[in-house]
Image (cartoon, grey):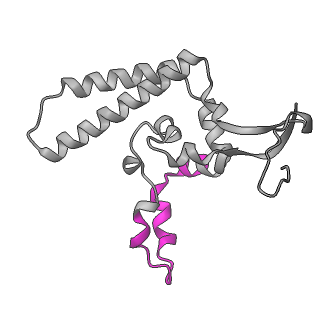
Amino acid sequence: MGYIKLTCPVTHVWYLKRLPRTYLNFAFARSIAKKPTFLRLRGSFEYEIQSWKYSIPLFFTTQGFETFRNREISTGAGAIREQLASLALRILTDNSLVEWKELGDEESAGNEWEEKKMRRRKDFLVRRIELAKHFLRTNVDPEWMVLCLLPVLPPELRPIIPISGGNLE
């Protein structure tokens, strides 16, 4: 059996498109809506006059800007692989369980919106705990969901499938 080494890592579309999203369940401690990003302010900038040039520095302190400028930024499957490789599944499971218990101990505020938000968070934590326990139980690293090598069967082992017309494929 041979292998093809890929020039850049790739992910399978099923990991990104199916629900619950496996990557996102591990990647973010909080829901995406809670993460501070420029995307949430996307509609408020006037691109013609470029007023956003003056808004961006407000997000950074001098120290934060230096850290940001000296940082390596990666995108795509390579970034996902790095993030999954740095996970400590046992710590993630323990922290999620503690947060789930804290949410269970909180009193109901009577606000339907807050209760729904808390229920969604608890469901997210349960899915995360179950997924992390599955990875630990099967002794699989989450970073293996990102492919760097593709296995290739030799021609002798490839299946021959008859197609219409009597030809073999």
Asked if residue 73 can be seen in this view, the reply is no
Instruction: Assign the magenta stretch its main secondary structure.
Output: helix
Left or right relative to 153: residue 48 = left
**Residue drawn at (53%, 15%), measured in percent from left and top?**
137
Q: Does the magenta stretch include residue 43?
A: yes
Image coordinates for residue 86, horizontal then vertical, percent: 61, 29
Image coordinates for residue 75, horizontal then vertical, percent: 65, 51
Which span of residues is magenta-colored?
Answer: 41-67
Residue lying furthest bottom in this view? 48
**Residue drawn at (67%, 38%), measured in percent from left and top?**
146
Image coordinates for residue 4, horizontal then vertical, percent: 85, 41
Left or right relative to 91: residue 100 = left
| Above/below status of 6 relative to 123 | below
Residue lying furthest front in this view? 166
Residue lying furthest left in this view? 110
Image coordinates for residue 66, horizontal then vertical, percent: 60, 49
**Residue drawn at (46%, 37%), measured in percent from left and top?**
25
